[in-house]
Image: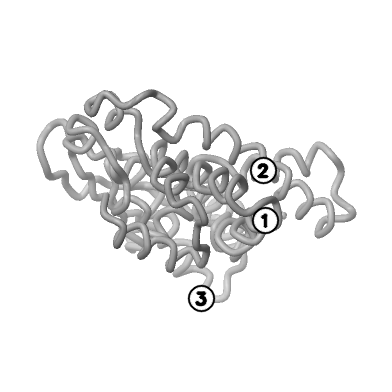
């Protein structure tokens, strides 16, 4: 990866590394290090471990301060949903992190650049890299800006299927279902397109590398449509 790409990402996240090799490591998948025969510590896994711990502390502090009447059990559930894989992948896509990854040829060919599990891990690895490079406050600032911002919209997304079910069947007392519109691409890297219908009317469509991911995006689009119509869904 050339220095220009790393600089573009630094500009995007608003943090400039003293040791830019930490950022490069945070973007490096083990498949790349294995192909290049680079020592294992050259991938993002150790940074992800550290970033996960920092993220848990910052999100716990945020919830403790902003949800003063919520009991411990509910805080734990809320924290888990805030920093779960789909949520972090959502944040990673906002930053287009997939464009900056160093992947092996096999991962590249099977869609690893857009896989939730990979880009969510990279999101945590970048947090770990910022923590090592600039300390806790720098990492906290990054988390506040890119993970803890617009939580209501993000929570609608990563829990969109159950949110839609509760809103449509529980509050509106109507029925809805998903239909597969089609699939494209080679067998190892398919893209599915799904629509969600409420009593015959299309509410939203979505594409994903699995039917479940496509349904999640279709449900999110449907929730945005219903919210624009004045229906409000807030789980917490």
Q: Residue furthest front?
A: 18
Give the residue pinned by disc 3. Answer: 229
Determine which quarter of the picture holds residue 111: top left
Q: Residue furthest bottom?
A: 229
Residue sitting at x 16%, y 36%: 109
Using the numbered discs, state the Cα–Cα distance from disc 2 to disc 1 in whole angstroms. Answer: 8 Å
Secondary structure under tag 3 reads loop
Residue sitting at x 29%, y 54%: 99
The tag earlier along the polypeptide, 2 or 1, is 2
Using the numbered discs, state the Cα–Cα distance from disc 1 to disc 3 in whole angstroms. Answer: 36 Å
Determine which quarter of the picture holds residue 183: top left
Nearer the camera: disc 3 or disc 2: 2
Residue sitting at x 51%, y 67%: 14
Determine which quarter of the picture holds residue 155: bottom right
The tag earlier along the polypeptide, 3 or 2, is 2
The quadrant of the image that shows the C terminus is bottom right
Disc 2 vs disc 1: Cβ atoms closer than 8 Å? yes
Secondary structure under tag 2 reads helix
Image coordinates of residue 89 in percent, x first then y, are: 45, 48
Question: Tag 2: Cα neighbours inside 10 Å, few (<14), some, or many (≥20)?
Answer: many
Residue sitting at x 20%, y 34%: 110
Image coordinates of residue 193 in percent, x first then y, are: 24, 50
Nearer the camera: disc 1 or disc 3: 1
Which one is in front, 134 or 158?
A: 134
In the picture, measured across the screen, residue 175 lies left or right of residue 32, that is: right
Image coordinates of residue 68 in percent, x first then y, are: 88, 55
Which one is in front, 42 or 60?
A: 42
Image coordinates of residue 165 in percent, x first then y, are: 52, 49
In the picture, measured across the screen, residue 207 lies left or right of residue 133, that is: left
Give the residue pinned by disc 1. Answer: 140
Which one is in front, 99 or 203?
A: 99
């Amino acid at each position: 990866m050339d220095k220009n790409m790393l600089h573009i990402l630094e500009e995007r996240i608003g943090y400039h590394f003293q040791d830019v090799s930490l950022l490069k490591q945070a973007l490096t998948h083990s498949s790349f290090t294995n192909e290049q025969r680079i020592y294992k510590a050259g991938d993002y896994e150790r940074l992800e471990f550290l970033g996960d711990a920092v993220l848990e502390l910052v999100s716990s502090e945020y919830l403790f301060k902003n949800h003063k009447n919520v009991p411990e059990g509910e805080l734990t559930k809320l924290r888990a949903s805030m920093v779960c894989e789909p949520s972090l992948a959502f944040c990673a896509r906002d930053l287009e992190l997939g464009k900056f990854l160093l992947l092996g040829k096999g991962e590249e060919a099977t869609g690893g650049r857009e896989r939730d599990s990979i880009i969510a891990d990279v999101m945590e690895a970048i947090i770990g890299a910022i923590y090592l490079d600039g300390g806790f406050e720098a990492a906290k600032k990054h988390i506040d800006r890119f993970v803890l911002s617009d939580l209501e919209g993000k929570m609608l997304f990563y829990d969109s299927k159950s949110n839609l079910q509760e809103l449509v069947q529980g509050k509106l007392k109507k029925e809805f279902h998903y239909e597969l519109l089609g699939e494209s691409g080679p067998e190892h890297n398919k893209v599915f397109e799904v629509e969600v219908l409420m009593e015959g009317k299309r509410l939203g469509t979505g594409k994903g590398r699995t039917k479940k991911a496509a349904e999640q995006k279709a449900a999110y689009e449907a929730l945005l449509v219903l919210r624009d119509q004045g229906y409000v869904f807030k789980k917490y």
